[in-house]
Image (tube, rainbow, N blue to C red):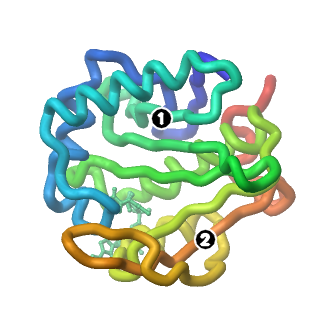
Amino acid sequence: MHPVDIAGPRLKLRELTRDDVDAVHAIYGDAEATRHLSFEPRTREQVEEIVSRSMASADEQPRTEYALAVVRPDEGDLVGFSRLALDPHAQNAATIGFALRPDTWGAALGAETVHLMCALAFNHLDLHRIWAARAPLNAASAKTLLRAGMTEEGRIREHVFVRGAWRDSVTYSILDHEWRAAGAFAAIGDRG
Ligand SMILES: CC(C)(COP(=O)(O)OP(=O)(O)OC[C@H]1O[C@@H](n2cnc3c(N)ncnc32)[C@H](O)[C@@H]1OP(=O)(O)O)[C@@H](O)C(=O)NCCC(=O)NCCS
């Protein structure tokens, strides 16, 4: 699917462009935003590379990665970076990740971002299952994933090597029929 353009009540997912580098760097270059992620803050050059790779992956056939901008259409700014990657080892499954600019936290935009990723996965890509992994200390992400209707599944021991040490991950998933049954946001990104 290209280009992605999926709107919710306050946010929209769209494809990244070269003009997004500074806005993505405001998130991926920020110590607070990356505290619980699997990498240390990125430099502007690294973010430029991430945006370029993301744009290139959008043109691949078949497309297996959706690295997208999360934007507030009303304010016209990019507030987040989200990524859905098809799982090469599982049928009709994908993993998601997301990060928002710290000044936007606390208004449940995280949960709406996950809903939009679910709409992409289930309404547009016909996936069966998506999953996410968070750092054990990432309490905000735990709330966001549960609020978005995901279920905690368990723990992957020493999943990520970051900041000089192995770190566990806590995993969550949601299935297509759970997403449809929840209904509340099912209208987001419907195939019209
Ligand atoms: C995770 C993230 C997307 C949440 O975004 P958000 O829009 O603030 O999320 P929500 O408003 O839906 O919910 C966050 C909840 O966590 C709470 N919270 C925030 N920081 C917290 C902390 N340090 N400890 C405990 N709870 C915390 C908030 O109060 C809120 O709960 P409440 O609504 O019950 O008060 C955002 O914090 C973020 O981008 N973090 C950095 C990247 C990241 O961790 N991504 C997830 C990777 S799995």
Q: How far apart are marks 1 and 2 (CA)?
A: 20 Å
Question: Which x, y percent locates residue 102?
Answer: 23, 54
Task: Please give the name of the residue rendered at 76% of the width and 44% of the height, measured from the top-left corner.
Answer: 122
Mark 1 lies on residue: 67
The percent coordinates of residue 159 (x first, y second) are 46, 73
Q: In which quarter of the image is residue 42?
A: top left
Task: Residue 145: give x, y in percent of width and height.
Answer: 54, 66
Crowding at dot 2, Cα within 10 Å, few <14 / some 14-19 / many 20+, comes out as many
User: Mark 2 or mark 1, which is nearer the start of the sequence?
Assistant: 1
Residue ID at (57%, 31%): 7
Picture quarter with ligand 1: bottom left
The answer to whether the residue bearing label 2 lies less than 8 angstroms from the nearest atom of ligand 1 is no
Which of these two is toward me, 5 or 67?
A: 67
Q: In which quarter of the image is the C terminus?
A: top right
SS for dot 2: strand
* Placement of 67 over or under 108, stated as above or below: above
Q: Name the residue under label 2.
A: 172
- Left or right of 188 in this view: 32: left
Crowdedness of circle 1 by 10 Å Cα count: few (<14), some, many (20+)?
many
Label 1 secondary element: strand
Kind of residue sitting beneath label 1: Ala
Q: Which mark is residue 171?
A: none
Relative to 167, 144 lies left or right: right
Q: Position of residue 32 (x, y in %)?
A: 18, 61
Figure quadrant of the N terminus:
top right
